[in-house]
Amino acid sequence: MRSFDLSLRRSCRSVSTFIGVVGVLALPTAALAAFVVIENGSAPPDPANVISDDAHISDSIFVRNAGCPPFWPSGSPQADCPAPGPPTDVEIGVNAEIGGHVTTLDGSNLLIRGGTIGGSLLSKDQSQITMQGGSVADDLKSLSASTVYLEGGTIQNDLLAYANSRILVSGSGFAVDGSPVPYGPLVAEVGHLTGTLDSGDPIDNYFVQGGSVYTGDIILSDPDAGVPDVEVNGMDGIVDVLVGENVTFSIAFAANGYLGQPGELYLGIVVPGNIFWLTAGGIEAVPAPLLELPGLVDIPPVDLFTLPAASGFLGILMVVDNAINGAIDAGAWSDFSAYLAP
């Protein structure tokens, strides 16, 4: 067991490993007519935020927060944005045809209901992609602290999770290199993943979990499983902030198919080198439940606390177990987010 180290954040492959251990990919060049940046800070049903036809058959699409990149259309559509505005939400419909790549950045969101993407699908920064259908002709890549929910559709090439990001694959009957694997983070760093997604679409892809400093995670998700959620200022993962900036930690939980079943809620405060567990009686150095619940319930988003960011690193680990025994069992559901202030 190793002490917590920032270089290992997101390298965990299970809750127990996390407790112990508490690269930018070049976008392939496509021969297309245009880069299209959608950065209006709006959301569907705004027509500008719904792609439902072949109007972008010759384009690559970039979904970005309002005002990003700052000098567009000069420079790169992926240029850094030091002061992003409100996030932009975009929906790709079942009849959409996009000839090139699709990339989400900053803190923006993309919902893919169907259609075709002729290049790769890429998430970066604190952005989020939910794919429920459709097809991607190249790789699915996640970078930075982004999250991809893969619930349906087809990825023609590889699943690549790098640099503190997560790809959550929801379905059943999963196997790696022909051997059945349980729900939770994949242990193998590379391999061949097969199974059936929530939509009924098969998954049959080579995968890589890697990164030169921070590793990404591919997590197999039970569609009936409980889903804890920890956010920092409304964002998942490791969020960069400034010293003195107000930081709000919030949590939520969806019980899904385990609604009403007994369970426990654990909350850990993560600092470099340690996790301190909140309990009804105070703070413990070893895992102890905050609540024992005779029946798991949905917890709507609730703010835990707000504080000015001190220099360094501070995180919250939320764990929900579907048993009452005073211990975090294998298969417990967890989520973790933190701030990092230089």
Image (tube, rainbow, N blue to C red):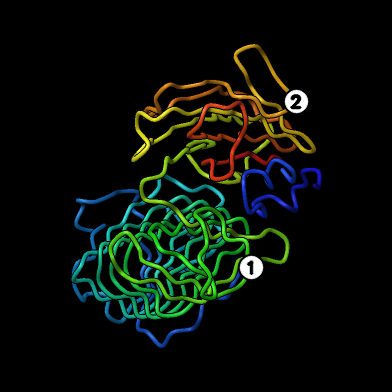
Amino acid, disc 2: Ala
- The dot on residue 116 is none
Spot the residue most to the bottom.
31
Q: Position of residue 133 (x, y in %)?
A: 28, 66
Tag 1: Cα neighbours inside 10 Å, few (<14), some, or many (≥20)? some
Quadrant housing residue 284? top right
Spot the residue most to the top.
281
Vertical order, 47 against 193 (above or below): above
Q: Position of residue 306 (x, y in %)?
A: 56, 23
Foreground of the two, 175 or 226: 175
User: Residue drawn at (54%, 36%), measured in percent from left and top?
Assistant: 232
Q: Which residue is mark 2?
A: 285
Give SS at disc 2.
loop
Q: From the image, which quarter does the C terminus lie in? A: top right
Q: Position of residue 45 (x, y in %)?
A: 19, 51
Q: Position of residue 76 (x, y in %)?
A: 51, 70
Tag 2: Cα neighbours inside 10 Å, few (<14), some, or many (≥20)? few
Apparent side of residue 254 relative to residue 168 in the rendered image (left or right): left
Apparent side of residue 284 relative to residue 30 in the rendered image (left or right): right
Amino acid, disc 1: Glu
Foreground of the two, 190 or 329: 329
User: Residue drawn at (46%, 53%), measured in percent from left and top?
Assistant: 127
Vertical order, 12 against 336 (above or below): below
Vertical order, 192 against 216 (above or below): below
Foreground of the two, 186 or 36: 186
Q: Which residue is mark 1?
A: 189
Alpha-carbon distance for marks 2 and 1?
31 Å
Q: State which tag comes first along the sequence, 2 or 1.
A: 1
Give SS at disc 1.
loop
User: Residue drawn at (46%, 22%), measured in percent from left and top?
Assistant: 293
Quadrant housing residue 150? bottom left
